[in-house]
Amino acid sequence: MTIVDLSVPIETGMPVYPGDPEVSVRPALTVERDGVNVLGLHLGSHSGTHVDAPKHIDDALPALDEVPLDRFCGPATVVDVRGLPPRAPIGPEPFRGVAAGTIVLVATGWSRWWGGDRYIGHPYLTEEAAALLIERGVRTVGIDALSVDPTPADPADDFPAHRVLLGAHAVIAENLTNLDRLLAAPEGRIEVSLLPLRLPGADGAPVRAVARIA
């Protein structure tokens, strides 16, 4: 069995979605001064590797603690779309073979640009791709990029992939990493955990995403 960490580190100054709270990780207590070490954390609910709850785009949709826990863990399928140019749309075709009940992880290869200016120019899911995933019974979608929609979002489009997925009470995981390490795994041998912090009423939360290759 192999465990693969799919999470980016949470640290001061890390990349965030434009307009989201900046991240700060600093000592609040120290052994020298206080007898114990305690970090003070300031971050947003969508900082680093995180999940989006349906409430992220509509107050009338389920909050994080109202989403069934089985949305956040289970068998995974990794869809390889690496090699796309910046800001390329990902249409439905790569997803036609995915099965209902699986966590679909979209490997764009964009995590290699984490921390740099190029990271914001990631490929993204089209509305049609998101609709196909919902039609096929998928309720958890992850991507190794800042968003399933373009960054920054086109105000005229209003986050179409988010609206299709979250509107169907699916969840989205973003800022995953190391998906390339899962591509060689035999079919049906990957289990993924994307369990978020337990934040009542939240629109999303950071996760320690991991994959287990049996």
Image (cartoon, rainbow, N blue to C red):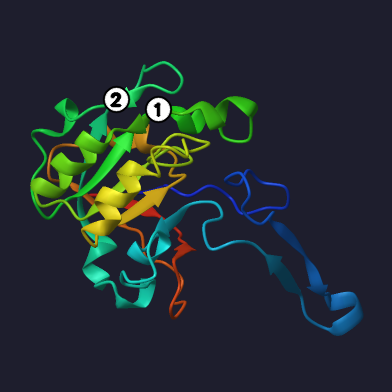
Q: Secondary structure at mark 1?
A: loop
In the picture shown, does residue 98 fall above or below 137? above
Q: Nearer the viewer, residue 80 or 131?
A: 131
Residue picked out by circle 2:
81
Give, as a three-letter code, the residue at label 1: Pro
User: Which residue: 63% across, 35% down?
Assistant: 115
Q: Nearer the viewer, residue 192 or 124?
A: 124
The mark nearer the N terminus, 2 or 1, is 2
The answer to whether 103 appears left or right of 203 in the picture is: left
Assess disc 1: are there few (<14), some (14-19) or many (≥20) residues with their C-alpha within 10 Å of its C-alpha: many
Residue picked out by circle 1:
123
Q: Nearer the viewer, residue 113 or 210?
A: 113
Q: Residue 130 at what x, y percent from top left?
A: 23, 41
User: Which residue: 31% across, 69% down?
Assistant: 61
The answer to whether 79 appears left or right of 19 in the picture is: left
Q: For residue 59, what is the image quadrant? A: bottom left
Give, as a three-letter code, the residue at label 2: Val
Foreground: disc 2 or disc 1? 1
Assess disc 2: are there few (<14), some (14-19) or many (≥20) residues with their C-alpha within 10 Å of its C-alpha: few
Q: Residue furthest front?
A: 156
